[in-house]
Amino acid sequence: MDPQFPESFNHRTEKLSTGRTYHFVDQVPEGYDPKRTPTLLLVHGFPDLWYGWRYQIGPWVRRGARVIAPDMLGYGGTSKPVDAAEYSTKKLCADLAALLDFLGVQRAVLIGHDWGAFTVGRFALWHPDRLLALVMMSVPYTPPSRQYIPVEEVARRAPNLGYQVYFAAPRSSSEILAHLNKFLSVIFSPPDAKVDFTLLGSLENILSKQSAQGGPCILNEKELQYYYSEFGKGMHGPLNYYRTSKFRHDEELAFGLPADLRPDLPFLFLWGTRDSTVVPSVVAKSSKFIPRYQGVAFEGRGHWLMVEAKDEITENIINWLEGLTSSTRATKL
């Protein structure tokens, strides 16, 4: 499991009971016991892949966990429906539950980053009995809303989320693909790069400029090339996540999803203090809906915590989980 060699991980591609095919990495530790070994299900965000967890998978397996890291719907080797309705969080959560079913795992620790954080937070509402613990990174928990808020209104209320208006527009799929090198270098820029793409219209302006490709990047050349090769297959699927707000709202309202997480569910939220997409007021409010809330802020870090703070993230999460298991006299990680 060498982070610089994606092929060194154990790759699988399987068709799930939901009818969708998922590619995922499945790493089993030495002495694996299906009844005692905890499973960590890692859910990436945008624009990312299973590969976003490359620095965490090996250390967590060596600490005794089974680690499952899928390419989410629309990404990498996983099915890529065209219709945005197929990317609703309810359907994504059904896929994740089906993946656990396929692997014979009844309950798992879910860990999500960015869109993956939102997804695992909703998984805790749609499938509350399938979780051992929940870790969300970079996107704080927000409860289901009884009122639909269009993305344009979201951007008006929170200007640092203005980029979502562009991502939600159908034209962004082809435009971003046409400027993929520049897009990736902007998205994966370090927090001190002074490249602000978050405000309404900023990203389109950056991509349209005839400037040299890229700038400072948190990825090395080999990592960047892997992302480029995967996203070069198309950006429509990944961007469809930003086109689901009405579908998600209608499903949650119809089902009557609760606002609060399960009372006994251990919860950890991690974020970087220099992440321009994190809304501090939302972070503060989220704890009201989470009975066992714990939070850790990483000073000076940006959005891509699994890379920018790879060692701290790896240790913080596994130590927290080991603390939970030892305190409950359950299986040690």
Image: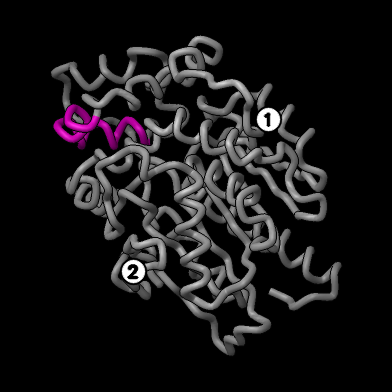
Residue 52, compared with residue 329, is above or below; it is: above
Residue 14, compared with residue 186, is above or below; it is: below
Q: Position of residue 45 (x, y in %)?
A: 44, 44
Residue at 23% across, 32% down: 173
Residue at 17% across, 20% down: 211
Question: From the viewer's perspective, is 63 left or right of 263?
Answer: left
For the residue pair 251 and 222, the one nearer the viewer reads as 251
Residue at 51% across, 17% down: 154
**Image quadrant in which you'd find residue 315:** bottom right
The stretch of residues the image draws in magenta is 173-188
**Image quadrant in which you'd find residue 162:** top left
Q: Residue furthest bottom?
A: 31
For the residue pair 130 and 275, the one nearer the viewer reads as 130
For the residue pair 260 and 41, the one nearer the viewer reads as 260
Question: From the viewer's perspective, is 64 left or right of 176?
Answer: right
> Disc 2 vs disc 1: Cβ atoms closer than 8 Å?
no
Within 10 Å of disc 1 (Cα), the crowding (few <14, some 14-19, many 20+) is some
Q: Position of residue 127 (x, y in %)?
A: 62, 56
Badge 1 marks a residue whose secondary structure is: helix
Identify the main secondary structure in magenta: helix
Q: Please, what is the three-letter code of the amino acid marked with disc 2? A: Lys
Residue that mark 1 sits on = 283
Residue at 37% across, 39% down: 85
Identify the image's colour scheme: rainbow, by chain, secondary structure or one colour. Answer: one colour
The mark nearer the N terminus, 2 or 1, is 2
Q: Please, what is the three-letter code of the amino acid marked with disc 1? A: Val
Q: Position of residue 270 (x, y in %)?
A: 64, 43
Checking the image for residue 15, the label placed there is 2
Give the number of callouts. 2
Q: State the separation of the CA atoms marked 2 and 1.
A: 37 Å
Residue 270, compared with residue 312, is above or below; it is: above
Whether residue 171 appears in magenta in the rendering, the answer is: no
